[in-house]
Amino acid sequence: MTTPSPRAAITTLGCKLNQYESEQIREQLARLGYDIVAFGDVADVYVVNSCTVTGRTDRDCRRLARKAKRQNPAATVVMAGCYAEVSREELREIPEIDLVLGNEDKVRLLELLPQAAALAAALQAVGLPTAACDLPRYSAGAMVTEFARHTRAFVKVQEGCDAACTYCVIPKARGASRSVPLADVLEQCRRLAAGHPEVVLIGTHLGRYGQDLPEARDLAGLCRRLCAEPSVRRLRLSSIEPREITPELIALTSAGGRALSGAGKLCRHLHIPLQSGCDTVLRRMSRPYGTGFYADLIRAIHAAESGICIGADVMVGFPGESEDEFEQTRALIAGLPLAYLHVFTYSRRPGTPAAEMPDQVDYETKIARNHILRDLSQAKRAAFAKEHVGRELEVVVETRNAATPAGHMTGVSDNYLQVQFPGDENLVGELVTVAITASTEDGVWGALTG
């Protein structure tokens, strides 16, 4: 009788870096013979790839670990990632958690997981390859060969942060800034581009790419090099700090610059954190720019390419944030050509300077301010979408989901619009041209051209 394969389940919280690293873990376990199942299923191993940006994410991680143990009390429950990095001893006291792996250790899961180590030894005994020797290596762990069930693939090119924002625990969780060598980035992109029409470059502090490498490198140069790769069909950048947006990056994401540079594969989309639109709050946050610099930057980018999508992170309820300071933030955002916001509510993080600051803002006030900016973000999204009615956009067709209307497909344009249009599953993973016909409360609508 055939012995059933062991089963593993992985859930991911937080940033794109975690999503990339979860794919590394998934592939290693799969190549070792594990069947990868949904986190709600019974499994032999559960991995919670954790985030610790807020107290809420910490609670979510603990809840998921306890849920896993209830599903199979005999399973090994692994807490990995940022929460595990900064709160190891606390997590080791939780009886439902069997193994705590920080960010440096989670790429060694197969060495540290008892069942995986035993399975690897059994495979080696009969001469079969194990995940550890079968997967190509990457300076950031095992190289990923595909992003399962995704048309867009993430590639980690940088990790860590040297900043000292007073509210943030991530430098403790991810360490100092360090870049992936160019040769490794190129090889990882080539492998993923074969099955994914869009590659997204990700990092904790993406704009610092190359500053620690022995050869002279920067993010703009990396983009130029990747755009010259025949296999890379479309390239997107994740979040970049304001001070790291260079004139060359602006040129590469503008229509004229893209044509002149031959870098037309780079998406017209920049996500540039603001955090606060008030100079006194930015100083308390230890952010290295002022509102004047930020506003001039956003307007310069928009002037170079009016069709570009510019997004921003903004935080409400930072300690001491007064009504007037919040209003300065709202007014600044309202007057800038931003297309959307990611709105965060300040959460007190032990071990950060902001946690000890006086005048902590009450919960109700923070939630009210959050709603105001979310409403502003929705209005900006709608306005940006309406500007594109009558235009043609290049769209990556995504897998259908429950929200996709019957007879339609959904895709993401190079400038980050979610577009719905008539089509079928045969289009998934294709780059198509869509003429935008309408923008309504139900979404952005279009039709295939040609």
Image (spheres, rainbow, N blue to C red):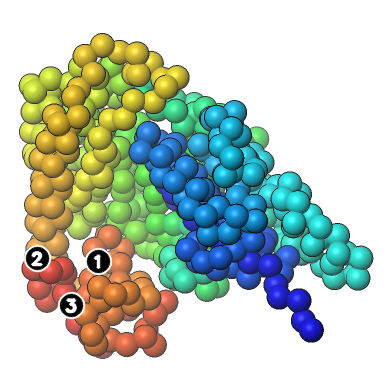
Q: Nearer the viewer, mark 1 or mark 2?
A: 2
- Residue 187 occupies which quadrant of the picture? bottom right
> Which residue is under mark 3?
446
Q: What is the secondary structure assignment of the residue under circle 1?
A: strand
Q: Earlier in the sequence, mark 3 or mark 2?
A: 2
Residue 304 makes an appearance in the image: no
Given residues 303 and 173, the one toward you in this image is 173
> Which residue is under mark 1?
418
Q: What is the secondary structure assignment of the residue under circle 3?
A: strand
Identify the mark at residue 390; answer none if there is no mark.
none
- Residue 180 occupies which quadrant of the picture? top right
> Which residue is under mark 2?
441
Where residue 147 appears, as percent x and y from the top left, is 52, 66
Q: Nearer the viewer, mark 3 or mark 2?
A: 2
Residue type at mark 2?
A: Glu
Where residue 55 appears, as percent x and y from the top left, is 37, 34
Q: Residue furthest top?
A: 358
Residue 393 makes an appearance in the image: yes
> Is 210 located above or below residue 357 in the figure?
below
Q: Earlier in the sequence, mark 3 or mark 1?
A: 1
Residue type at mark 1?
A: Gln
